[in-house]
Image: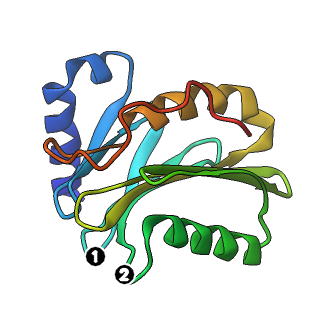
């Protein structure tokens, strides 16, 4: 946990614009990606295998940021498999967009909303953020999701991911 705290402090000083408005940056050296973490989210767990981390907020929202290998599947096939898994968990997926370089999908289950964003990385892997939040906070989270979409990026030198994200995140 101390290491995680040092990483956050270091990243805040390395990215003062993010830190100035409460945003921090999570970077993952194993998969070579980074993403912005909204204000109010605290690191609660880092994965044992180094693929990502979990952040929780006081209002019950949970943010997972992680990398994954697509294995034998192509990027689009991996996303479709993840959508199917979420549907099996009871999420009603109402939006999905899958391209060769990025994908997004969202849905709802009882009083919660799910938003997932992924970008393809150079080595056949992908970076993801998965945000689950209360439906009652939909408008507030729509603004956060838009910024998070733009922030999910591969490391420098990887040209596989998209050059631009869509302007808005449908829910």
Q: Is residue 31 left or right of residue 44?
A: left
Residue 102 image offset from top left, x and y in percent: 46, 49
Q: Is residue 50 left or right of residue 86?
A: left
- Camera-side residue of 52 and 59: 52
Which of disc 1 and disc 2 is earlier in sequence? Answer: 1
Residue 35 image offset from top left, x and y in percent: 35, 42
Residue at the far bottom in the pictured view: 72
Q: Which residue does the image show at 44% across and 65% down from the upper left?
A: 75
Residue 136 image offset from top left, x and y in percent: 80, 37
Q: Is residue 72 visible?
A: yes
- Camera-side residue of 59 and 76: 76
Where is residue 13, by image quadrant? Answer: top left
Q: Which residue does the image show at 43% across and 32% down from the upper left?
A: 150
Q: Is residue 77 left or right of residue 161?
A: right
Q: Which residue does the image show at 76% across and 51% down from the upper left?
A: 112
Tag in front: 2 or 1: 2
SS at circle 1: loop
Q: How many marks?
A: 2
Residue 77 image offset from top left, x and y in percent: 53, 72
Residue at the far front in the pictured view: 100
Q: Which residue does the image show at 56% across and 24% down from the upper left?
A: 167
Determine the CA span between mark 2 and mark 1: 20 Å
Q: Is residue 124 left or right of residue 22?
A: left
Question: Circle 1 is placed at which residue position?
Answer: 48
Question: Circle 2 is placed at which residue position?
Answer: 71
């Amino acid at each position: 946990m101390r290491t995680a705290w040092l990483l956050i402090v270091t990243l805040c000083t390395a990215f003062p614009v993010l830190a100035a408005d409460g945003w921090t940056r999570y970077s993952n050296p194993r998969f070579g990606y980074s993403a912005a973490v909204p204000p109010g989210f605290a690191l609660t767990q880092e994965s044992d295998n180094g693929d990502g981390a979990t952040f929780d907020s006081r209002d019950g929202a949970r943010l997972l940021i992680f990398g994954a290998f697509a294995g034998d599947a192509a990027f689009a096939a991996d996303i479709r498999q993840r959508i199917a898994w979420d549907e099996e968990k009871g999420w009603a997926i109402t939006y999905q967009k899958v391209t060769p370089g990025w994908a997004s999908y969202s849905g709802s289950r009882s009083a919660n909303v799910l938003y997932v964003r992924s970008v393809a990385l150079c080595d056949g892997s992908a970076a993801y953020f998965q945000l689950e939040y209360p439906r009652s906070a939909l408008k507030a989270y729509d603004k956060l999701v838009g910024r998070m979409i733009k922030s999910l990026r591969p490391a420098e030198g990887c040209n596989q991911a998209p050059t631009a994200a869509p302007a808005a995140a449908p829910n």
